[in-house]
Amino acid sequence: MKTILLLFVSFSLCSSGIAQSDTIPPTLVCKDAYATAPTFTCFASISVHDLIENVSDKSTAPLSLGFRVSCSGSGFPENAIQLNIKEYFTHVDVWARDSSGNTATCTLRIFVYDSGNCDPAYEYISQTENGEGLDNTRVIRDGYNCVGDTFHWETMQFSSEYHHIWGEIVPDIGYNSIVTASHKLKPLNGVTTADLLLIQKHILGIEAITSPYKLIAADANMDGKITTFDIVLLRKLILGIITELPHKQSWRFIRKDYTFPDPGNPYNPPFNDRYIITPEQNPLPHKFEFIGVKIGDINGDADPKS
């Protein structure tokens, strides 16, 4: 009879000379927020150490640190331990990397105070189809970046002779901005039964409206079509049954540099009514020009100064 002996051997990777790899990232905690004054005109010089609440690692080897403006890159920001940050609010991503290549990151919001002399000048011009300046236009700037930081600014252009002076069109790297225009005052300005007759003749094929801007003006409910329902809405406005049109706009705006592919059908494709500014644009645009169209005014007798 044979006896079989089973021998169980246990051993340690470390005792056998095989080193275990470090896969645990550093511990990194950003400050909740950080605010500072400009250290030179319009910028603040900020160190990555200013933004960290706590950083540690299981290894005793030195950690590499870096940071960048959010939405402006990917991967570890090499050698970025000091940055010049523009005035305004922005988000930054802070990174830590250990000697094994493990990384950790956190994000915080920075506010650099306005020193009062850093806003560049931008021109805004709104005119009618005939080149008359349009008063009382509200200029709107909306913006966002990839981490959900947004801004919304509105400014009223009171005089058609005044080219509005802006602040920063794009607050910082990583932001997109959208510039639009709005005018909600006096929806009855220039709207009479004579305009209803012109729209009716167009619908019946008796006398076509040929200007793409006048076709846009005839679309009272802004649905991309000219129908008898537009006439009904404008008649209610004239009679005082309603005091504003469905979209609460009195004027519509089209970029002045926009060319209609089909002037007889300005709604297809949708006309361009905004400027979109991306971080990649260099140089950034400084002039924003719109053509204003008075909704319901087909014969062009609306007062642009009203």
Image (spheres, rainbow, N blue to C red):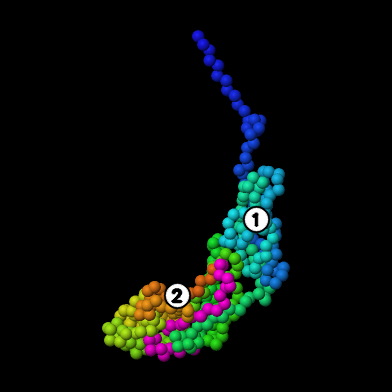
Under mark 1, the amino acid is Glu
Q: Is residue 7 visible?
A: yes
Range of residues picked out in magenta: 279-306
**201 magenta-colored:** no
Image: 119 above or below 90: below
Q: In percent of the image, x 55 and y 79: which residue is there?
A: 287
Closer to the chain start, of discs 2 and 1, is 1
| Contact flag, marks 2 and 1 (Cβ < 8 Å) | no
Q: Which residue is the site of mark 2? A: 272
Q: In percent of the image, x 58 and y 56: which residue is there?
A: 74
Residue 81 on image: x %, y % = 68, 58
Q: Which disc is residue 78 wearing?
A: 1
Q: In percent of the image, x 53 and y 73: which residue is there?
A: 141
Residue 110 on image: x %, y % = 64, 63
Under mark 2, the amino acid is Asn
Say which element carries label 1: loop
